Image: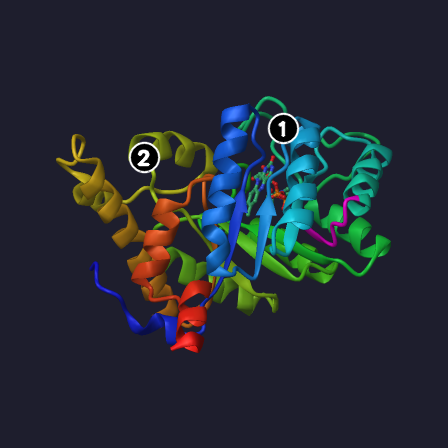
Amino acid sequence: MSSKTENGQRGIRISFEFFPPKSEEAETQLWNTVADLTEWEPDFVSVTYGAGGSTKTPTLSAVRRMIHETPFTTASHLTCVGATREDTHRVIDDLLATGVRRFVALRGDPPGGVGSAYQPHPGGYANAAELVLALRERGDFDISVSAYPEKHPESRDTAADIDMLKRKADNGANRALTQFFFDNDAFERYHDRVRAAGVKIPVVPGIMPIQNLTQLKRFAGACGTHIPSWLDERFEGLDEDADKRADVAADVAAEQIEDLVRRGIHEFHLYTMNRSPLVSAVLDRLNIPRKTDAREGAAA
Ligand code: FAD
């Protein structure tokens, strides 16, 4: 599939995720990407936060610039792993001072990385549900949390994941953004179980357009995301053809979104990896109007 579809008329809502740059080159890349993606008018964008505060300064400065120099409604991610409650409140104070009113509240991975034993800080918040409550007690913020359609790697089972999601929703989360996945059937089964458990907040699929399948496979293993064999088949023989690879990647993500729309889902969180061309190619395939289209329409 590479033709445009009529999904643009069906009111798809999108948000974008960025990560804070750690070099001058990455900084230029981020802000060029932000400029390119502005015309898609996302509902909101978010900036990730390194667990244990490892990106505190770059996250704060990216969020500040996003709020003051772009039209985006901006959420800051925030983790509580490895921090006392006082540490976490200091970061919240700093974020509030930059104008943040939206958070993506997370526990964060343990310092040894995914799979190492997680130990709550004795003086800190033990999990994202406690962090959501702390934020809710501080103010009337918009709070997103994580969800794992294919199970969090540390989790006993999906029921434990859904219990945690319910605690986060009960504590005041406004929506859940999912880990990226490629198996829409798995998402639908998870979504049905979430609703059956009485969780009413939107569960927004996290969509990862595939910039590089080999790298993604390494990353997916750590996140618990299953890479179906049909993805290998779609990319087979394209190692030397970057243009064709980009076309296939855009087709795959657009097809995934179209299928989820048919299943009744209308909000999507796109992992941009701080690059715009592939994200724009996906949204073009879905026929989502750009701001420039609206201006041209009005001028005609
Ligand atoms: P929680 O929701 O607190 O828990 C995760 C799972 O662990 C639960 O679903 C539950 O099954 C299990 N669990 C935890 N405690 C218990 C318990 N007491 N009893 C039973 N089960 C339990 N990481 C970053 O470092 N920075 C980011 O900016 C970032 N952004 C993210 C954005 C999204 C949309 C997603 C999906 C993930 C993001 N992550 C980020 C990764 C996240 O920090 C890790 O997956 C981390 O290991 C768990 O954080 P959480 O908020 O999902 O944890």
Q: CA distance from mark 2 to mark 1?
A: 26 Å
Q: Secondary structure at mark 2?
A: loop
> Which residue type does callout 2 highlight?
Asn
Say the numbered circle drawn on residue 212.
2
Is 208 colored magenta in this rendering? no
Is 287 above or below relative to 177?
below
Query: Which residue was labeled with disc 1?
Result: 110
Disc tally is: 2
User: Which three-letter amino acid code belongs to the residue tagged 1?
Assistant: Pro
- Circle 1 — which element? loop
Quadrant location of the C terminus in the rendered image: bottom left
Q: Nearer the viewer, residue 210 or 20?
A: 20
Q: Could you say where residue 161 lies in the image, as x and y percent from the top left?
A: 57, 50
Of the four image quadrants, the one with ligand 1 is top right
Does residue 52 sit above or below 178 in this rendering? above
Magenta range: 98-103
Of pointers 2 and 1, the one earlier in the residue sequence: 1
Q: Is mark 1 within 8 Å of ligand 1?
A: yes
